[in-house]
Amino acid sequence: MAFVQRRKGPDVVGSFGLLQPLADGFKLILKEPISPSSANFSLFRMAPVATFMLSLVAWAVVPFDYGMVLSDPNIGLLYLFAISSLGVYGIIIAGWSSKTKYAFLGALRSAAQMVSYEVSIGLILITVLICVGPCNSSEIVMAQKQIWSGIPLFPVLVMFLIPRLAETNRAPSDLPEAEAESVAGYNVEYAVIPPPIRPDERSTELHPYSPGLCTSLFPGGWPPILDLPISKKIPCSIWFSIKVLLFLFLYIWVRAAFPRYRYDQLMGLGRKVFLPLSLARVVPVSGVSVTFRWLP
């Protein structure tokens, strides 16, 4: 991020500052645990744990390789969609249990933002399912052996990435954590919890299923990028990890390059642009798919 913004970033801890995130996490662990005196202590501590657990259980249906998946139900994509919709509860509980106006304002912002973009993401997933057919995560990957769905559905891929940034409160859509208006949003009162469990943008950037879901839906999942003998020698799980890292790089690059939206602009973008576009995309994709399916 410092290189993209042409500034000097943290370069003291470790070589090129690579150990700086570990130092930040260690500092947060050692901080004094301070909670608001008026907060609901049990809900205040439960909210970040619930958010963290939801981001982990979603990985259960994301396939890393052929047969390398914790659970492979026939409704894997619906399971992912249900898990993503439950994430709003942890944020609402974190903001409400803090009993402070800035945390509650950030929670309301985040809830409205996530719900608004959830509908667009659902319509985009329907578009992908119409093309690939099954709702099983592994079968979706296997259906892309001939051609990645991200090639004919490239506009859908772009329409999927932007709402995912907004739904996970990632920049330039990190309005719940806007320091200028609401201090730090729904996590303003959390001081001692480490970043992996802290319900903020760092917990939605590094370990949730969003890059893994994008990799399974559009760039073909675990199969090699090129059908060459040298590429087949590399394990499929390594190819999957490379694609996930590319999506993570894209997320961080967008965060470093683009400024934050105004809140009314962000909500208008979701309701007036992405919702009609995603709905309008379902009709031609389903029509073309059904037409070619019935042709002799």
Image: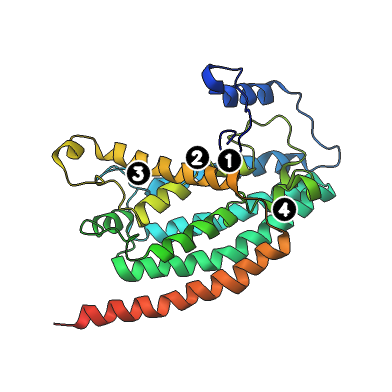
SS at circle 3: loop
CA–CA distance in space, label 3 to label 2? 17 Å
Where is 175 relative to 293, above or below?
above
What is the crowding at mark 2: few (fewer than 14 residues within 10 Å), some, or many (at least 20)? some
Say which amino acid is labelled 3.
Leu
Where is 227 relative to 31, above or below?
below
Decide which of tag 3 and tag 1 comes sooner along the chain. 3
Q: Confirm or deny contact between disc 2 and disc 1 (CB under 8 A).
A: yes
Query: Which residue is most to the front?
Result: 6
Which numbered marker is on residue 107?
4
Between 57 and 222, the one nearer to me in the picture: 222
CA–CA distance in space, label 4 to label 3? 32 Å
Which numbered marker is on residue 70?
3
Decide which of tag 4 and tag 3 comes sooner along the chain. 3
Decide which of tag 1 and tag 4 comes sooner along the chain. 4
SS at circle 1: helix
Decide which of tag 4 and tag 2 comes sooner along the chain. 4
Q: Confirm or deny contact between disc 3 and disc 1 (CB under 8 A).
A: no
Which residue corresponds to mark 1?
203
SS at circle 2: loop
Residue 19, position as x, y percentages in the image: 55, 21
- The residue shown at (60%, 33%) is 2
Say which amino acid is labelled 1.
Ser
What is the crowding at mark 1: few (fewer than 14 residues within 10 Å), some, or many (at least 20)? some
- The residue shown at (33%, 81%) is 287
